[in-house]
Amino acid sequence: MAEAVEFVGEPVTDEVEAPVVAEGDDAPVESSEDSAASPASADEVDEADTDEDASEAGEAAAPRMSKREEALTNEGEIAADYLEELLDIADLDGDIDTFNEGGRAHVSIITDSDALVGKDGEVLDALQELARLAVMTETGHRSRLMLDVAGYRDKQRSMLQDLAADAISDVQESGEPVRLTPMNPYQRKIVHDAVAAAGLVSESEGEEPNRRVVVLPKA
């Protein structure tokens, strides 16, 4: 069966070169009354108590995270602690942000340095695998955690989506399939999603590491 969504490029006879991408795809302060102010009346005290009770009831009624969300949040926290230690050892500056999206835990290292990205994202890929291993060691379960450093993956995703848009345009104009250059699974997924959003169909062909996306015209 054809793989879910992937890239865009040029007619079958040509190839569209894809950018190399690393794999994987917030209380106000209340002012106090002057100490010399007159004491509150009984009605005022009762009203204050009632407001406090209502506030506590509202907090109790707040929805809790599902077990799945809790598990993903835990994954992000474990990975963040692990990566923070690595940053300290390497004497590198960076803030760490975690969030859940698309059924995965995401961790981002916010930094101006690309030392943890490496050529074509190779260091980033290796670091992501280490973070996943740290999570699995702690939880006993495999992790699909995604790591980004210095916004590298976001930038590459944007480039891939632009490439897919060009390929989609070529297919719509020519009515012929467009074959892209080989990509890793993470890249192909981004392209497949872009093609599907445009109402076209794409498939993957070939064997790794030369597997590529082919964008097909409407039947």
Image (tube, rainbow, N blue to C red):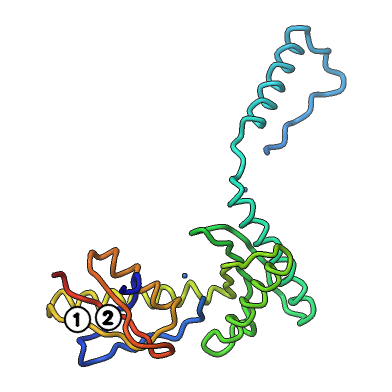
Query: As displayed, is residue 121 above or below residue 104?
Result: below
Comes first in the chain, label 1 or label 2 = 1
Amino acid residing under circle 2: Val
Q: Work out which quarter of the rendered image holds the N terminus and state it.
A: bottom left
What residue did someone put label 1 on? 177
Q: Position of residue 122 (x, y in %)?
A: 57, 86
Residue at the image position 35 percent from the left and 73 percent from the top: 3
Q: Work out which quarter of the rendered image holds the C terminus and state it.
A: bottom left
Give the crowd class for mark 1: few <14, some 14-19, many >=20 residues within 10 Å.
Answer: many
Asked if the residue under mark 2 is in contact with the one under mark 1, i.e. CB atoms within 8 Å, the reply is: yes
Residue 165: quadrant of the picture: bottom left
Question: Considering the numbered disc 2 on the image, is that residue within a helix, a strand or a loop?
Answer: strand
What residue did someone put label 2 on? 214
In the displayed structure image, the side of residue 84 where residue 107 appears, left or right = left
Q: Position of residue 89 (x, y in %)?
A: 79, 80
Amino acid residing under circle 1: Pro
Residue at the image position 63 percent from the left and 74 percent from the top: 111
Residue 172: quadrant of the picture: bottom left
User: Seen from this angle, which residue lies furthest front?
Assistant: 1
In the displayed structure image, the side of residue 9 where residue 25 appears, left or right = right
Q: Position of residue 69 (x, y in %)?
A: 59, 51
Give the crowd class for mark 2: few <14, some 14-19, many >=20 residues within 10 Å.
Answer: many
